[in-house]
């Protein structure tokens, strides 16, 4: 092929790619201007009982945030294996820091457990994974972020509901708009509650008259506990455990939609991670195989499913359970 012909093909290919990219960007743009959308949303919020004064305060200077749209659309180049994810999330540094904080806040955590029944190590593990023990609470103005995502359209209905919930928080006088800060997706405070979760589950545990999941650890721990209990947390029961699985195990028994009592799993040849027998307890469990047949395996109980109400990711729920076990040196 001549150099001229090659250059012509490259120009055509480049032009075609640019055209496709431009078309993709055009399709991604909302059909309605932000100003028109906001006017209609304000009317809806007003009809739902949000006062004009709150709307003025909340939406003063509001504008769509391109960085939020980019964050929402950004996809990872590849999916991490569970082993890779666990190494990042349940790191040695996070375990070490979690143990220090568990010891430091033990009296408070025990008071919270006395009311709600959630183990301190579970709360500290959630705290560590959600906000790196409070180091990351987010600095985005939640109203601006949620308005952007509700207008942008990819998950408009979800973020519309959350924006209405955020306005209700302001309407109740619980948080000023400029102090209602969170992640680019609107998750707030040290426990990363969405506004609707805050309204349903946040607790004033320190008794100061405010539900402060940003700076009050009593409120943070109690709010997480209340969420878990209302999602179905069973006191006195583990989340699950790592196990050894025989090569002969029927693959049709694996998965969250398959349950059996521990005695049945024992008869199928499943053992604790150290090779010992499973506990003799009337507990139903599902078997998860991660990263294929040669990867780690876990029996997961009811409290694992509760963790998945918090975040519908098996990676997340397993990591919370494993980190909690590491914090107290729980036996496998």
Image: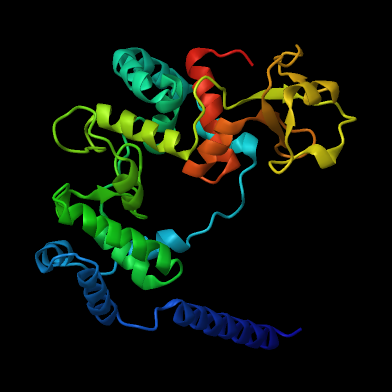
Residue closest to the eye, 124 or 131? 124
Residue closest to the eye, 102 or 13? 102
Residue farthest to the right, as pictured: 248
Residue 132, by quadrant, is top left
Residue farthest to the front, as pictured: 282
Q: Quadrant of the C terminus?
A: top right
Residue closest to the eye, 224 or 81? 224
- Seen in the image, is 292 located left or right of residue 120? right
Name the spot of residue 220 as percent of width and height, x first.
30, 32
Residue 259, by quadrant, is top right
Name the spot of residue 287 as percent of width and height, x first.
72, 33
Which residue corresponds to the image point at 36% horizontal and 12% vertical from the top-left? Answer: 103
- Seen in the image, is 21 located left or right of residue 1? left
Q: Quadrant of the N terminus?
A: bottom right
Residue 198, by quadrant, is top left
167 w.r.t. 260: above or below: below
- Seen in the image, is 284 located left or right of residue 105? right
Which residue corresponds to the image point at 30% horizontal and 13% vertical from the top-left? Answer: 107
Residue 145 appears in the rendering: no
């Amino acid at each position: 092929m001549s150099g001229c012909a090659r250059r012509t093909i490259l120009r055509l290919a480049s032009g075609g790619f640019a055209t496709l990219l431009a078309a993709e960007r055009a399709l991604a743009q909302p059909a309605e201007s932000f100003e028109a959308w906001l006017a209609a949303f304000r009317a809806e919020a007003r009809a739902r009982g949000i006062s004009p004064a709150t709307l003025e305060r909340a939406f003063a200077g509001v504008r769509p945030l391109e960085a939020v749209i980019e964050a929402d659309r950004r996809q990872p180049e590849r999916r991490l294996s569970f082993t890779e994810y666990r190494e990042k999330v349940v790191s040695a540094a996070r375990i070490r820091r979690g143990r220090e904080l568990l010891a430091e806040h033990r009296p408070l955590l025990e008071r919270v457990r006395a009311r709600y029944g959630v183990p301190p190590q579970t709360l500290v593990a959630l705290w560590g994974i959600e906000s790196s023990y409070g180091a990351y609470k987010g600095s985005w103005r939640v109203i601006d972020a949620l308005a952007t995502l509700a207008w942008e359209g990819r998950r408009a209905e979800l973020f519309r509901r959350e924006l209405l919930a955020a306005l209700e928080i302001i309407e109740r006088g619980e948080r000023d708009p400029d102090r209602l800060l969170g992640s680019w997706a609107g998750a707030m405070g040290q426990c990363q509650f969405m506004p609707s979760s805050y309204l349903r589950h946040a607790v004033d545990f320190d008794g100061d008259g405010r539900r402060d999941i940003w700076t009050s650890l009593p409120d943070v721990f109690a709010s997480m506990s209340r969420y878990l209990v209302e999602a179905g947390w069973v006191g006195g029961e583990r989340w699950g455990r790592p196990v050894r699985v025989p090569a002969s195990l029927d693959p049709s028994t694996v998965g969250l939609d398959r349950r059996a009592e521990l005695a049945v799993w024992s008869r199928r040849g499943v053992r604790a991670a150290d090779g010992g027998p499973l506990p003799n307890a009337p507990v139903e469990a599902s078997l998860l195989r991660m990263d294929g047949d040669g990867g780690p395996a876990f029996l997961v109980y009811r409290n694992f499913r509760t963790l998945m109400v918090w975040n519908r990711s098996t990676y997340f729920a397993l990591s919370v359970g494993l980190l909690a076990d590491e914090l107290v040196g729980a036996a496998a």
